[in-house]
Image (cartoon, grey):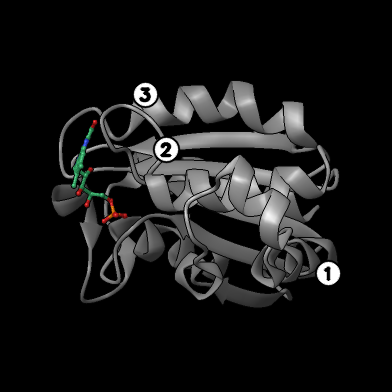
Amino acid sequence: MRILAFAASNSSISINQQLAAYAASLADDAEIEMLDIHDYEMPIYRHDREEESGIPQQAHDFLAKVGAADALIISFAEHNGIYTAAFKNLFDWCSRVGRDVWQEKPMVLLATSPGGRGGKGVLEFAIGHMPRFGGNLIGHLSVPSFGENFDTGAGKLIEDTLDIQLRGLIAKLTS
Ligand SMILES: Cc1cc2nc3c(=O)[nH]c(=O)nc-3n(C[C@H](O)[C@H](O)[C@H](O)COP(=O)(O)O)c2cc1C
């Protein structure tokens, strides 16, 4: 099984990338690819830009990565209650290729933040939104207070209840 995991984040030191990497590491016997969405950075979507130059190759390349995976793990950074601009722009360009952006792939959706809400706003939005674009939602988890619940040195969750929940989700994703 091939799992593609990434953070829907703007940051090269993303806490959501750390969470996504830990979640992926829990998958037994899986081939893991950690993707950095900045490798698919494109100019901001504009109607006129698409008319003039078409859809950038990066959108096609990202969709090919999704297509080559058997399952997805996505962890969302929350910016002002919603997706980061980096993720939204990538998504917008991909949606111009076709509505089936997530290609019916089973997916676990995560979110974490330094604060106590754990990115709940963006996660709730993503839970409703991703299936409308071809996401096969297996489950979701919000991790509040990242600094308290995640050991960045060891790269793992240190809060037992959250860890058990995450292990359960990944077992379901890979079964
Ligand atoms: C523009 C901006 C808006 C933010 N808005 C929120 C927010 O609405 N809710 C929240 O919990 N954290 C918010 N934060 C803090 C992020 O949760 C924090 O930067 C976190 O590290 C982002 O995840 P990442 O490290 O994976 O990118 C915001 C940060 C920025 C820069």
Residue 121's disc is: 3
Q: Residue at x 28, y 35 (%)?
A: 118
Q: Residue at x 22, y 69 (%)?
A: 152
Local crowd size for mark 2, using a 10 Å CA cut-off: few (<14), some (14–19), many (≥20): many
Residue 83's disc is: 2
* SS class, disc 3: helix
Distance, label 3 to label 1, CA atoms, is 30 Å
Q: Residue at x 25, y 30 (%)?
A: 80
Amino acid type for the residue under numbered disc 1: Ala
- Going from N to C along the chain, the mark reached first, 3 or 2, is 2
Local crowd size for mark 1, using a 10 Å CA cut-off: few (<14), some (14–19), many (≥20): few
Residue at numbered disc 1: 68
142 on left or right of 60: left
* SS class, disc 1: helix
Ligand 1's image quarter is top left
Amino acid type for the residue under numbered disc 3: Gly
- Going from N to C along the chain, the mark reached first, 1 or 2, is 1
Q: From what the image shows, is residue 57 above or below residue 123?
A: below
- Mark 3 C-beta closer than 8 Å to ligand 1: yes
The x, y position of residue 110, in whole percent, is 47, 43
Q: Quadrant of the N terminus?
A: bottom right
Q: From what the image shows, is residue 98 above or below residue 60?
A: above
The x, y position of residue 101, in whole percent, is 76, 46
Distance, label 3 to label 2, CA atoms, is 9 Å
Pick the front one: 72 or 27: 72
Mark 1 vs mark 2, foreground winner is 2
Pick the front one: 77 or 109: 77
The x, y position of residue 30, in whole percent, is 72, 74
